[in-house]
Amino acid sequence: MSGKHILVAVAWPYASGSRHLGHLAGAYLPADIFARYHRLAGNRVLMVSGSDVHGTPITVRADQEGVEPQVIVDRYHNEFLRNWEELGISWDLYTSTGTDNHREVTWDVFRTLHEHGYIVPKTTQQFYDPEAERFLPDRYVEGTCPHCGYESARGDQCDHCGRQLDPEDLVDPRSRITGATPVMRPTEHYFLRLSAFEDRLLDWLQSRTGWRRHVLNMAIGFTREGLQDRAITRDLTWGIPLPPEFTEIGEGKRIYVWFEAVIGYLSASKEWAQRRGEPDAWQAWWTDPDAESYYFIGKDNIVFHAVIWPCQLMGYGGLNLPTDVPANQYVTFKGEKGSASRGVGRSISWYTERLQPDALRYALAANLPEQNDTDLSDGDIVRRVNEELVATWGNLVNRVLSMTAKNFDGAVPEPGELTDVDRSLLERVDRGLEDEARMIEKVELRAGLRTAMEVAQAVNAYLNATEPWKTAKSDRARTGTVLWTAIQSLAALSVGFEPYLPFSSARLRGMLGLDEPLRWGRLDVAPGTRLGSIEPLFGKLDEDVLTD
């Protein structure tokens, strides 16, 4: 198989709670659209992710429920797997950070960075809860953000303004365990020397082209403020332990999640290769300078993926830096950012129980927050599905195939000589697929979907102009030509919509009698091909379908 090697690296969700539509629109659906297109285009895609099972949100929830962290991990990892299957997210591997493989790859990165002088031990001050008598990891500390005044900022990040924080930055800090005011005590940890990469990283960032402006501005701005060395271990009992030989900083330490979770892209690629029985196969995506890598994340993860992870890769050596980090902005619900921890935004599972998967995929893809935050309501979802997906695309398919079945005994008619109008439509279809491809390759996915829908509208306009329901009574040959032309257009659109609407696109090809291998471009539906059973692709939604 020819084509480029394309790594599609997708954010690792914390297995600490159900994911909501903001997560789906922020990372998982865009990544799937992008990966599906590149497979159709003949490129060799490796799309990986997994559940992050070591984050402190997991231990926080476990403490709240009085259970072991693994109980929480198992519950939500399995829920994620169901979500991905229901929505057709086409992973090459979806794993977790709880595997032996991930631990070994993390240790390899840790050891190599230490050997290269980029990981060093330091004594630091860390918040300590005097009532619980324990050190507090970042997310066990809450307080007021010093930048925007948000009163429920975490010790690692403010969910309101998106700024990265250290616990000591917080105003009026408090322990999430007891509510007590924590005190500073000395403790020893390993630090990643981010400061050693500042100049090299800034040069690299300033050489990036085609990146989204908000991503590049945030990464460059953060780097110009000066990269600070950052602790990569914590006083924890849940997480990846240090390599056995690293005992100088004492017992009870774990590698902190922000350092090891991003290594998951590499460890998942290696796990995928091992499962195939080709343990070195991962290298084609990671060490070949012609390979491309795209990191699909939300805005709150830009610094980790456009600053810190590139530093880790530079320090390790020999691995590709990101080609692009097409981070989406936030999906908001009634003006408030979706948040699993604060219960803002319904879960993915809630929506998959009520909507066809392609209906949900369409409504989100049409609203992807690529450049700006996007406020999404249930009314918007219903309107998009009914007024666009059903009224434009679904009805088009139904009218063409129903007319063909009625007038040509359920088979694709033999066309006569094509007119300029017929040829113009097919040229418009081909041009639309080319335009859509360019959009998707630039990760302008919302525009790609809009392009496909505009082609569907052009086919509708063609039918309205040629009126085959009228010519069927007087000119069977012309009617056959028009319907043949429309069917070729539907076949092409089944490809154009495939990255966005995989379930209904496959059903449409079944109705068209197509079973050939799929590729990007207009498919040929030969005259005489028997049509399959014709059924509506989508059902119109009741206005109250998304009410409790």
Image (cartoon, rainbow, N blue to C red):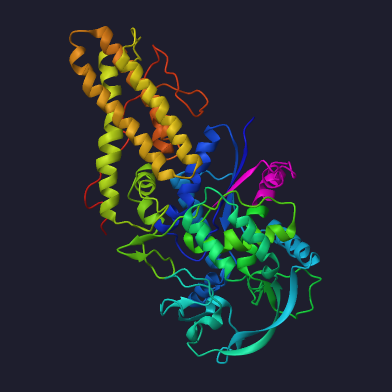
- Residue appearing at x 75%, y 74% in the figure: 120
Res. 511 visible in picture: no
User: In the image, 207: left or right of 381?
Assistant: right
> In the rendered structure, does residue 276 fall within the stretch colored magenta?
yes
- Residue appearing at x 49%, y 85% in the figure: 173
Between 117 and 267, the one nearer to me in the picture: 117
Q: Which residues are magenta?
A: 268-295
Name the quarter where the C terminus is drawn.
bottom left
- Residue appearing at x 59%, y 35% in the figure: 43
- Residue appearing at x 31%, y 34% in the figure: 393
> In the rendered structure, does residue 285 fall within the stretch colored magenta?
yes
Res. 154 visible in picture: yes
Residue 97 drawn above or below residue 533: below
Residue 221 drawn above or below residue 80: below
Residue 479 drawn above or below residue 76: above
Relative image position of residue 19 (x, y in whole percent) = 44, 59
